[in-house]
Image: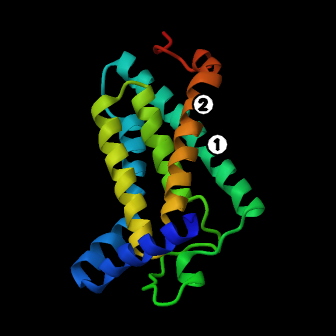
Amino acid sequence: MIENFDVAWIYRLNGWMVDPVVARIFTFLALWGVLYFVVVALWLWYAPSNTQAEFKHKRAVVMIALAVLVALLIVNFFDVVLPRPRPYMALDQIIAVNVLVDAASFPSLHVAMTFAFASMLLLLKYRVLGWVSLAVAALIGLSRMVVGVHYPTDILGGVVVGIVSAVVIYYEAAWIRQYLPSKKAA
């Protein structure tokens, strides 16, 4: 049942690749969409602001990095335990795009990491930045299906892994905040 769902939707979404403009947009997102998150992390780390905000931003980057690391470890575990071939490897007539991927499909690493990032921003009360980041993460997930490297359930798995990683780090690694300075030492 789920396999039929995955196959039907991957063919439908991958069919968008016949339009060259759509193909370029989604290929760009699939390849380079994660750079948005790098820029946000660098902005949070280096943004000029008052001292209190500066340390809040740096603590946020540390918490985000931990959530992304947990997501990476979980995805790598699934890659070993449940190796699933990517759609372009398993199905005929998929318009494949070379997006530099490994062989495992479930769950999506890109989606897990970007949802961990965006979820942590929301948990840390970065409302606007968090919701924009969540929208970008969703677009990256959609693009990974359109270019034929992930099934819908891979994306859903990545969303769950990302959100769970952020929640776990937020609540279980809160003790880390006490080791991060809250204001500049004199």
Which labelled disc corresponds to residue 169? 2
Placement of 29 over or under 20, stated as above or below:
above
Q: Nearer the viewer, residue 104 or 8?
A: 8
Q: Where does the N terminus fall, quadrant-wise?
A: bottom right
Q: Position of residue 111 (x, y in %)?
A: 49, 54
Residue with the most extreme right position: 81
Q: From this viewpoint, is residue 150 visible?
A: no
Report the residue at 36% width, 73% height from top. 13
Count of numbered labels shown in the rendering? 2
Which labelled disc corresponds to residue 70? 1
Placement of 55 over or under 136, stated as above or below:
above
Q: Are marks 1 and 2 in contact (CB under 8 Å)?
A: yes
Q: Nearer the viewer, residue 39 or 51?
A: 39
Tag 1: Cα neighbours inside 10 Å, few (<14), some, or many (≥20)?
many
Residue with the most extreme front position: 1
Placement of 34 over or under 46, stated as above or below:
below
SS class, disc 1: helix
Instruction: Inspect the image, locate mark 2, and give the three-letter code of the amino acid beneath it.
Output: Ile
